[in-house]
């Protein structure tokens, strides 16, 4: 009896070692989950752990694990292999599939033809750029913005809506043979939206995807406006733009657009401001305060004569320098408010003071 238990125990250990990581657990789905449930779980978790969104040290590792798990469980053949023998079975299947088959058109590539066919297999949907209008105060302090984004995603059951088509050479590309003369034919590429992958075309209509190849989805994103960002800086989410069958999704890029400020003007990491003083203050000196972008007070002091449009430089009171604790310089241009006129008595007093 002990021998039987020992054999059972060793068998379980061996299976666990072969199975490796639990892809179902990584995606938080059951082993009976449908393709749609697996895709929904992956979208939710991949956005949560996306390195561009999640600053946690282990976010990149979790994101990579999610991608591997989804790659296996979203593929019918790989999932069946994984269910039979875990990661090792999937690796063996991939090794068999990666054995290059003879390509009847490969000879053309040695003569400079057919290069576009390979590029089409790695087609991407266009990147999407969205302007984010922020105030100078937001760039000074930094801010996290919650954004709802509508995009097109591939129908979860898209794999069931594909049919074999040997003429399809990649997404949107079909190869056709055209006869030039008796005994002479030419291979040409033509656009065909029904081609979704090499050897695969979209089957329409398809009850599994009644809305077509893609459907609309709203996702929630967190755009981190970092302290010290400049006009034109970007926040990029890799492969979060629209999806398309047979394509790698493009990137979603938020572009910072700084709005004008009523008091301060920014030049690089420096700030510029105009400050008005009286004629008396320009002659005898002054001490004044200026309210900064975050509300703290900056003291401006001068104990001698100020000339018109004189510029004072106050170090470390400019914009924060991104990725550093330092700040730029605040340049204060002093404008003198001259009186419209003097009385005779004032003129006499000024002459006596200046004599």
Image (tube, helix red, strand yellow):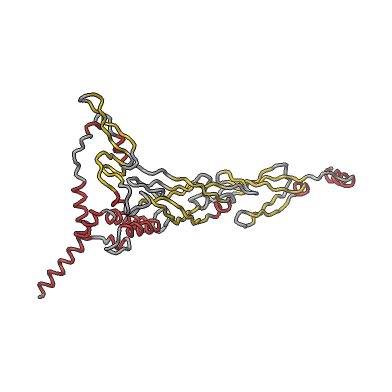
Residue 138 place in picture, x, y as percent: 56, 53
Q: How many marks?
A: 0
> Which of 10/341 is in front?
10
Give the residue drawn at x 30%, y 63%: 25
Residue 309 sits in which quadrant?
top right
Quadrant where the image shows the N terminus: bottom left
Give the residue drawn at x 27%, y 62%: 22
Residue 282 place in picture, x, y as percent: 75, 47
In the picture provided, is 325 more to the left or to the right than 352? left
> Which of 247/110 is in front?
247
Quadrant where the image shows the C terminus: top right
Residue 179 place in picture, x, y as percent: 25, 27
In the picture provided, is 194 more to the left or to the right than 323? left
> Which of 4/84 is in front?
84
- Find the residue positioned furthest to the right: 344
Residue 213 place in picture, x, y as percent: 35, 49
Give the residue drawn at x 20%, y 25%: 183
Up-down relation of residue 21 to residue 178 (above or below): below
């Amino acid at each position: 009896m002990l021998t039987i238990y020992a054999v059972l125990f060793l068998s379980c250990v061996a299976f666990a070692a072969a199975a490796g990581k639990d892809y179902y657990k990584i995606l938080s789905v059951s082993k009976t989950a449908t393709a749609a449930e697996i895709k929904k779980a992956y979208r939710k978790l991949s956005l949560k752990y996306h390195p561009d969104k999640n600053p946690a040290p282990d976010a990149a590792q979790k994101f990579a694990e999610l991608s591997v798990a989804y790659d296996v469980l979203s593929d019918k053949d790989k999932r069946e292999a994984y269910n039979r023998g875990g990661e090792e079975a999937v690796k063996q299947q991939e090794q068999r599939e990666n054995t290059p088959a003879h390509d009847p058109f490969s000879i053309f590539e040695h003569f400079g033809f057919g290069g576009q066919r390979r590029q089409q297999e790695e087609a991407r949907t266009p990147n999407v750029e969205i302007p984010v209008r922020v105030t100078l105060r937001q760039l000074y302090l930094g801010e996290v913005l919650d954004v709802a984004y509508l995009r097109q995603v591939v129908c979860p059951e898209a794999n069931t809506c594909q049919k074999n088509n040997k003429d399809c050479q990649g997404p949107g590309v079909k190869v056709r043979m055209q006869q030039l003369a008796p005994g002479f034919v030419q291979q040409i590429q033509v656009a065909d939206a029904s081609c979704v992958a090499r050897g695969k075309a979209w089957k329409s209509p398809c009850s599994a995807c009644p809305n077509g190849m893609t459907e609309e989805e709203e996702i929630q994103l967190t755009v981190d406006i970092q302290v010290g960002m400049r006009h034109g800086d970007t926040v990029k989410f890799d492969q979060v733009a629209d999806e398309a069958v047979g394509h790698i999704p493009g990137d979603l890029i938020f572009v910072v657009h700084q709005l004008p400020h009523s008091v301060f003007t920014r030049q690089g990491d420096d700030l510029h401001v105009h400050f008005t003083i009286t004629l008396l203050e320009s002659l005898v000196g002054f001490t004044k305060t200026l309210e900064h972008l975050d509300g703290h007070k900056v003291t401006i002091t001068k104990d001698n004569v100020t000339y018109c449009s004189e510029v004072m430089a106050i170090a470390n009171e400019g914009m924060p320098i991104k990725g550093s604790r330092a700040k730029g310089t605040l340049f204060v241009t002093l404008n003198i408010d001259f009186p419209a006129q003097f009385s005779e008595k004032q003129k006499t007093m000024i002459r006596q003071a200046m004599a």
